[in-house]
């Protein structure tokens, strides 16, 4: 079974929550051994990125990546941010990316949550529906 960086991060944070300093060191050492045993060492940067994201969320800040085929104006990003703050009931910090391969539309990601309204996604779904 493949363990995602999000699952690793969540497990580690749950284990460390409320643990003493000595116990934390043992848990962290065991955690790193498990990651190594599972040959997931290459995922450590993503695991630590998820830990940082989860800690920020815990303090009321949700990191969101918005991907569009073309650069979004500051006004558009601000408007999306306001709507997402209402949806997530949280302060939003947005990182905007450009990926022409999505064709059009927008992809919004936060952790494992993905809202994909890109043209590429629409076309792929349409192709699958034709082959069924």
Image (tube, rainbow, N blue to C red):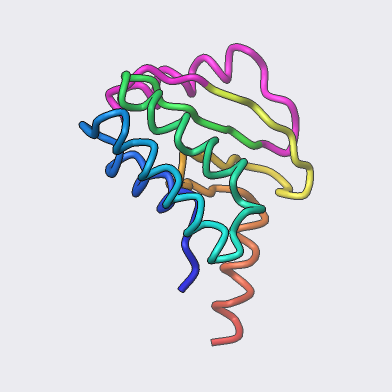
The answer to whether 17 appears left or right of 70 in the picture is left
The answer to whether 99 appears left or right of 6 in the picture is right
**Point 50% across, 56% down: residue:** 33
Which residue of the protein is positioned furthest toward the right in this rendering? 100
Quadrant hosting residue 122: bottom right
Quadrant hosting residue 85: top left
* Residue 98, position as x, y percentages in the image: 74, 34
Is 116 covered by the magenta stretch?
A: no
The foreground one among 88 and 32 is 32
* Looking at the image, residue 7 lies above or below residue 39: above
Is 78 covered by the magenta stretch?
A: yes
**Point 73% across, 39% down: residue:** 69
Q: How many marks?
A: 0
* Residue 115, position as x, y percentages in the image: 47, 46
**Point 48% across, 23% down: residue:** 80
The foreground one among 123 and 10 is 10
Quadrant hosting residue 104: top right
* Looking at the image, residue 79 lies above or below residue 45: above
**Point 47% across, 29% down: residue:** 52
* Residue 36, position as x, y percentages in the image: 57, 59
* Looking at the image, residue 69 lies above or below residue 72: below
* Looking at the image, residue 64 lies above or below residue 32: above
Magenta residues, as a range? Answer: 68-93
The foreground one among 68 and 88 is 88
């Amino acid at each position: 079974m493949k363990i995602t960086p999000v699952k690793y991060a969540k497990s580690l944070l749950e284990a460390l929550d409320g643990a003493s300093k000595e116990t934390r060191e043992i848990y962290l050492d065991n955690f790193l051994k498990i990651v190594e045993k599972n040959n997931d060492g290459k995922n450590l940067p993503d695991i630590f990125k998820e830990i940082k994201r989860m800690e920020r969320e815990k303090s009321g800040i949700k990191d969101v990546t918005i991907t569009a085929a073309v650069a979004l104006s500051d006004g558009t990003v601000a408007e999306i941010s306001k709507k997402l703050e209402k949806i997530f009931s949280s302060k939003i910090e947005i990182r905007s990316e450009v990926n022409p391969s999505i064709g059009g539309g927008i992809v919004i990601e936060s952790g494992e949550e993905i809202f994909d309204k890109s043209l590429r996604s629409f076309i792929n779904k349409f192709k699958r529906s034709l082959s069924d």
